[in-house]
């Protein structure tokens, strides 16, 4: 009887619904479908805030018991303890055949456990270690509104930066293979770690043609999202409410759109509220857009799909995004994207084909790009179909997970 191959995936944490979390969860789900026995572990876990349906389906676990959840700064404590004690709990994973370390400290934990057990391990990086290699926007805003525990760790670890830099590089360069999400990030990872990387961008689910709403349906009618009834057409944002995501760019651009075409559309913002949400609402009120901008809160997977399906334009304002799943998820539903012509979106959006890439960071140009799609239904339909085809052919989950499966099989057959 053929033995089932066992995989353990270690991720940095599941405390909010982000792209990195989605990638790991989809990898686990789809590797299970392919016949692997997959375990997913992380130092931190919030079952209510991080894709509740998928987290429960995958069965994500933490390295330490739940009583730690009752103390202050629990996520910071979990992160530190999981990293320091990784060699001690390695024996727990003795029956695993191969490990995947997703981002830090996932890569470090995979390194410790795999080396002690003399097993192969892979590393998947959406980004370099942000404690050691922060982006300018991370330095400007920090992580306090994202997760205060992470902000505390970032400040504390600056005093240990030489040590963390060494351990970070050690765990990455000694892996059997380093997967990276997208060509833009591949160049950055190769320059930092001086290693060969395997470009394996994350994916999205593309929908069959019969599921895509007609152009008339996206421009007319009403859709219920959460507890809100939204009049179509509408623009859509689905990022986390973090200052680094710069929703203010879209809100200001939308304000300019409405000054020229007062009733042309609404703006829908999904996602759980954070401390930064108050700042966004304050901006909306200042611009007197209360009746046009709708914060609909966290949505279920089915509701999120409905939000994408009925959107006329997907807006992706994050200025220094490493990759970004949003444009691909929107593309899977035949929705074009407007983003900045910089960083991750230069990989996920083809300017003038699957959407538009505006001049960084000119709100006027962003406004003009939105307006072009809003005011030309044929262009919107053409771009939407091109976006769906590109997601299907170049960024499907099947393609992404298939690349990982191929390497796993190669390593385990040696």
Image (cartoon, helix red, strand yellow):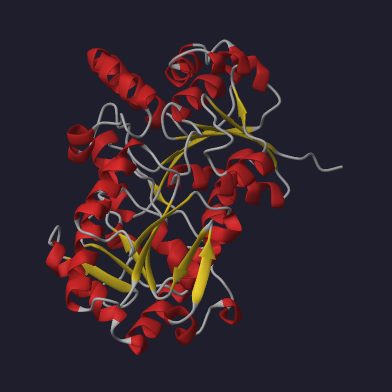
Q: Position of residue 182 (x, y in %)?
A: 36, 54
Whether residue 392 is visible here, answered yes or no, is: no
**Residue occupying the point 45% across, 67% down:** 230
* Closer to us: 276 or 10: 276
Q: Residue at x 51, y 11 (%)?
A: 85
In which quadrant of the rendered image does the N terminus lie? top right
The residue lying toward the viewer, choosing from 15 and 166, is: 15
Please indicate whether residue 46 sits to the left or right of residue 317 in the image.
right
Q: Position of residue 352 (x, y in %)?
A: 26, 77
User: Which quadrant would residue 90 be assigned to in this image?
Assistant: top right
Nearer to me, 155 or 252: 252
Residue 150 lies, with reference to residue 196, above or below; the image says: above
Q: Is residue 300 left or right of residue 322?
A: right
Count the numbered circles shown: 0
Does residue 120 appear left or right of residue 255 in this picture?
Answer: right
Residue at 24% x, 66% y is: 254
Q: Nearer the viewer, residue 202 or 54?
A: 54
């Amino acid at each position: 009887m053929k033995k089932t191959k066992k995989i353990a995936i270690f991720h940095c944490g599941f405390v909010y619904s982000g792209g990195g979390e989605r990638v790991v969860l989809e990898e686990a789900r789809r590797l299970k479908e392919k016949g692997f026995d997959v375990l997913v572990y992380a130092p931190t876990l919030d079952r209510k805030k991080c894709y509740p349906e998928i987290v429960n389906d995958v069965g994500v676990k933490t390295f330490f018991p739940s009583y730690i959840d009752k103390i202050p700064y629990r996520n910071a404590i979990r992160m530190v303890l999981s990293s320091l004690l990784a060699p001690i709990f390695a024996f727990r994973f003795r029956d695993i055949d191969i490990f995947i370390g997703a981002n830090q400290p996932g890569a470090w934990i995979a390194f410790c456990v795999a080396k002690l057990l003399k097993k192969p391990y892979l590393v998947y990086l959406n980004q370099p270690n942000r404690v050691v290699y922060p982006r300018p926007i991370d330095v400007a805003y920090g992580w306090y509104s994202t997760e205060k525990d992470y902000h505390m760790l970032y400040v504390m670890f600056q005093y240990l930066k030489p040590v963390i830099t060494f351990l970070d590089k050690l765990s990455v360069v000694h892996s059997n293979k380093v997967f990276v999400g997208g060509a833009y990030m591949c160049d950055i990872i190769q320059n930092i770690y001086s290693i060969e990387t395997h470009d394996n961008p994350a994916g999205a689910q593309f929908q069959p043609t019969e599921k895509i709403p007609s152009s008339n349906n996206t421009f007319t009618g009403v859709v219920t999202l959460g507890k809100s009834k939204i009049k179509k057409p509408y623009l859509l944002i689905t990022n986390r409410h973090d200052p680094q995501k710069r929703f203010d760019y879209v809100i200001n651009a939308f304000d300019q759109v409405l000054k020229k075409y007062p009733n042309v559309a609404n703006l829908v913002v999904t996602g759980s509220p954070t401390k930064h949400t108050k700042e966004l609402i304050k901006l909306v009120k200042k611009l007197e857009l209360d009746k046009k901008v709708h914060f609909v809160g966290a949505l279920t997977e089915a509701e999120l799909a409905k939000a994408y399906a009925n959107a006329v334009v997907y807006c992706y304002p994050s200025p220094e995004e490493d990759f970004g799943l949003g444009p691909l998820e929107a593309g899977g539903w035949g929705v074009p994207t407007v983003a900045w012509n910089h960083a991750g979106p230069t990989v996920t959006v083809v300017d003038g084909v699957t959407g538009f890439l505006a001049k960084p960071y000119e709100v006027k140009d962003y406004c003009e790009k939105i307006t072009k799609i809003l005011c030309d239904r044929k262009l919107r339909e053409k771009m939407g179909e091109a976006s769906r085809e590109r997601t299907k052919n170049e960024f499907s989950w099947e393609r992404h997970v298939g690349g990982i499966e191929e390497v796993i099989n190669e390593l385990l057959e040696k």
